[in-house]
Image: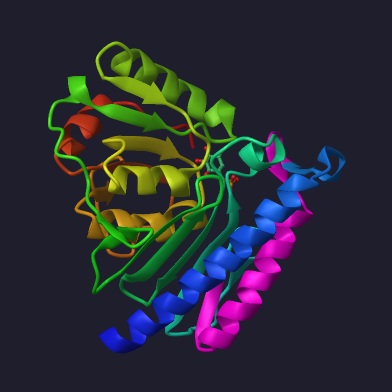
Amino acid sequence: MNEQELNALTEQVKKLALEAGSFLTNERKKFDLNKVEQKRSHDYVSYVDKESEKMIVAQLHKLLPQAGFIAEESGTHMNGEPYCWVVDPLDGTTNFIHNNAPFCVSIGLRNKTEMLLGVVYECCRNELFWANKYSKAYLNGQEINVSRVCELNNAAIELGFTYDADRYRNFIVPIINRLYGNVATLRVLGSAAAEICYVAAGRFEARIEALIGPWDVAAASIILKQAGGLVSDFCGNESDLFYSGKETIVSNGLLHAAMLQTINNLKVEE
Ligand code: LIP
């Protein structure tokens, strides 16, 4: 796919993300908490996630029939296709069901070796983040770049709290103890896709989370990288295909080494 084709596809995906976001916003106005299901303890889903995903997947298949899918609610559907969509139809589900912000639509595309495009639409602030491999990163049409903060003591840090508390607790609590009082501020916002885009926009300097899905991080990861940031696992391994979400440290690049040092010798339980 050449630059012109990818730019044209990116425009189509931006429109789709806005349409899906409009569906989320409208459903939020009449949402019934009784319609919430639990996939596992404290991991919620509703018909909104599922219906949004069905609509997004159907439209993406029309845009690029030669692509497989990794989607949060319907799973992985790949059979050797040259491209793969990585979709979270509603990132920040728990925020959504409690009428909190942020919550967003996240759509990423990769080929067999690298991320090609990422679009994240955060509904509550009407913010459309996007980038592709040939472009800079943008928020509502304005170019965005990571911050130039290079001292951890001046950094705003986001933390994610994944559902699997039993495996995660002994990893994240020591990190809170190491960071709290030694950084400008700590925040837990509940949407990995939106929060990684906030690092891309220079609002935060870094974020740590583990045990989330590729759909939570794929689209935002290319937006962050095109904004000058870094995405890696907890050993500092980057990859153009990095979207697993199993171990995710993102930063403005300047503070990546300091963030890796913060998690030094801590492990998430298998
Ligand atoms: C959420 C992530 C968030 C994480 C939550 C959940 P979902 O995704 O964006 O970072 O802390 O546990 O995984 O489930 O709302 O799509």
Q: Position of residue 239 (x, y in %)?
A: 27, 60
Q: Is residue 49 above or below residue 268?
A: below
State how many labels appear.
Answer: 0
Q: Position of residue 242 (x, y in %)?
A: 34, 58
Residue at horizontal 37 percent and vertical 49 percent from the top = 197
Whether residue 180 is in magenta: the answer is no
Q: Position of residue 174 (x, y in %)?
A: 38, 17
Scheme by which the image is coloured: rainbow
Which span is picked out in magenta?
40-69
Q: Is residue 158 above or below residue 19?
A: above
Tell whether 171 sits left or right of 162: left
Residue at horizontal 45 percent and vertical 46 percent from the top = 194
Tell whether 17 sits left or right of 2: right
Q: Nearer the viewer, residue 43 or 18?
A: 18
Q: Is residue 197 above or below residue 258?
A: below
Q: Position of residue 193 (x, y in %)?
A: 46, 49
Tell whether 196 sits left or right of 15: left
Examine the rendering and report whether any part of residue 74 can be seen. no
Tell whether 22 sits left or right of 80: right
- Image quarter where ligand 1 lies: top right
